[in-house]
Image: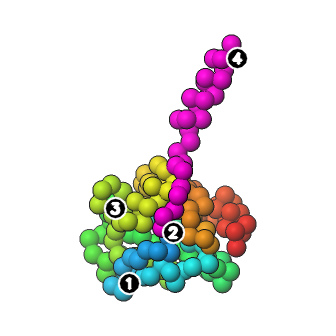
Amino acid sequence: MKKITLLIILIMIFFTNNKVSANYEKIFFDFKINSITGEIINLKDYQNKLVLVVNTASYCGFTKQYDDLQLLWEKYRSDGLIVLGVPSNSFNQEKKADTEVKEFCDVNFNIDFPMTTITEVKGENSHEIFKWAEKNFGKSAIPKWNFHKILINKEGKIEDTYNSFTKPMSKKITSKIESLL
């Protein structure tokens, strides 16, 4: 009976642990990405800050999370939090042009946190940031849908990930942010 119990526990651990052993040959701050207005965002500029990376989309049921992302940004930016919106059409719910996304975010949500160009976030064509996230944190870092969140700590490593259902102003996210700031 003890062997069966031990086997069941080992199987559960093996199949529920999605994190991989991170060797971090690179850290988040080693990357660059294009902004929604065409400039290069050098992530080195975010060193010693927390960064919440969120893949976004204009036509998603979670799009109203833009309000909470803006609130999160306003509440914690002076303490060292960066909210980085990454518009993506990986789930076929984004506008076709960066200018359209920017206008949508400005008009409907008054967004002023940094946004990137429309970017692939999953699969072989995903941006190197998302490939790096998967390599160093495992499957939980791969966006399963829009408004997936990856929290990067001040050392440039992944601290945690949050699925689309986890609201940006949830206690789960704000408590973690407050503990790291």
Q: Is disc 3 surrounded by few (<14), some (14 to 19) or many (20+) residues within 10 Å? A: some
User: Which SS class for mark 4?
Assistant: helix
Image quarter for residue 68? bottom right
User: Which SS class for mark 3?
Assistant: loop
- The spot of residue 143 in percent (x, y) is 44, 55
Q: Nearer the viewer, mark 3 or mark 2?
A: 2
Per the image, the residue denoted by label 1 is: 40
Which residues make up the magenta segment? 1-27
Question: Mark 4 to mark 1: distance in Å?
Answer: 58 Å
Question: Mark 4 to mark 3: distance in Å?
Answer: 45 Å
Amino acid type of disc 2? Answer: Ile
Q: Are marks 1 and 2 in contact (CB under 8 Å)?
A: no
Which numbered dot is residue 126? 3
Q: Going by the image, does 176 lie left or right of 133?
A: right
Which numbered dot is residue 27? 2
Say whether disc 4 or disc 3 marks the residue closer to the N-terminus.
4
Say whether disc 3 or disc 2 marks the residue closer to the N-terminus.
2
